[in-house]
Image (cartoon, rainbow, N blue to C red):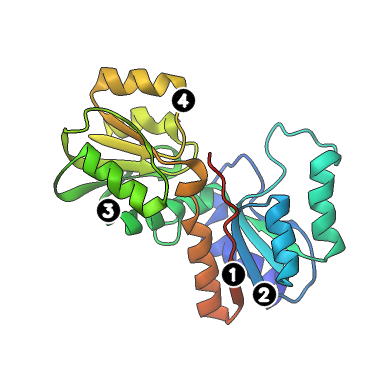
Amino acid sequence: MDRNELELYLNGLLETSRFRDYCPNGLQVEGRRRIERVVTGVTACAALLEAAIDWKADAVLVHHGYFWKNETPQITGQKYRRLRLLIQNDINLLAYHLPLDAHAELGNNAQLGARMGWLADARFGDNDLGFIATLPMPTSLSHLAAQVGNTLGRAPLVLGDPDRKLRRVAWCTGAAQGYFDDAIRAGAEVYLSGEVSEPTTHLAAESGVAYVSAGHHATERYGVQAIGAHLADTFGLEHLFIDIDNPV
């Protein structure tokens, strides 16, 4: 597949023009024109790039790429070493941040909800990034937390009464603890995100709404996998998801 055709297709699929993001979405580093093998991963760290080189990938597609707002512009240190890996091996880097969180079917939030068995019936927050659903039957916070842990393969941090029965669950992957207020206003009885901040504890205690922090990386592994599988099914590209574990 032609590199430019792939970028145009993904930009349209993920509706990148709708978002004011903290980084550029789309092709961030140009490599070879012809793409047949695509590696997906959460973050374009050196370990992912080295694994992609070993697999002889033509392109790497990630959720966390480069050139973030307020980032120093100098190409030095680890930034230089990462870019050198891509350029020396003629590998394309494509990155999609907020558009990949928000997509109604292939995005991080949609894919996490599918794995948890949560069918969203409303959205909230900036760009409707947050999802909210009604559970089929009431479940305790401790049972929900155990389900999250089993699904994601890591024990979450849980704030709230473990025996409280819940029906209305809201979620937004990654560093979305700032949407906790929005989730409360949307009617959530429990809110799940990837990260947690110091004020989150007080907001959970004072609002009576439970909070589950399930890990930034752990909650954002699924959107890129879904995009990679979609590209393989649609265009016959070879796809490999590589999970570089991250405890955060």
Residues packed near mark 3 inside 10 Å, few (<14), some (14 to 19) or many (20 plus) = many
Are the residues tagged 3 and 2 within 8 Å (C-beta)?
no
- Picture quadrant of residue 126: top left
Q: Residue at x 33, y 20 (%)?
A: 203
Label 1 sits on a secondary structure element that is strand
Separation of residues labelled 1 and 4 (CA atoms) = 33 Å
Circle 3 sits on which residue?
118
Spatial separation of the CA atoms under disc 3 and disc 1: 26 Å
Instruction: Kindly state the secondary structure of the residue where label 4 is placed.
Output: loop
Q: Find the distance from the CA under tag 2 to the CA under tag 4.
A: 39 Å
- Residue under numbered circle 1: 240
Query: Of the residues under marks 3 and 2, which one precedes in the sequence?
Result: 2
Residue carrying label 2:
37
Q: Are marks 2 and 4 in contact (CB under 8 Å)?
A: no
What SS does tag 2 mark? strand
Front residue of 114/27: it is 114
The amino acid type found where label 3 is placed reads Trp
Residue 56 at what x, y percent from top left? Answer: 74, 72
Please report whichever mark, 3 or 1, sits nearer to the chain's N-terminal start. 3
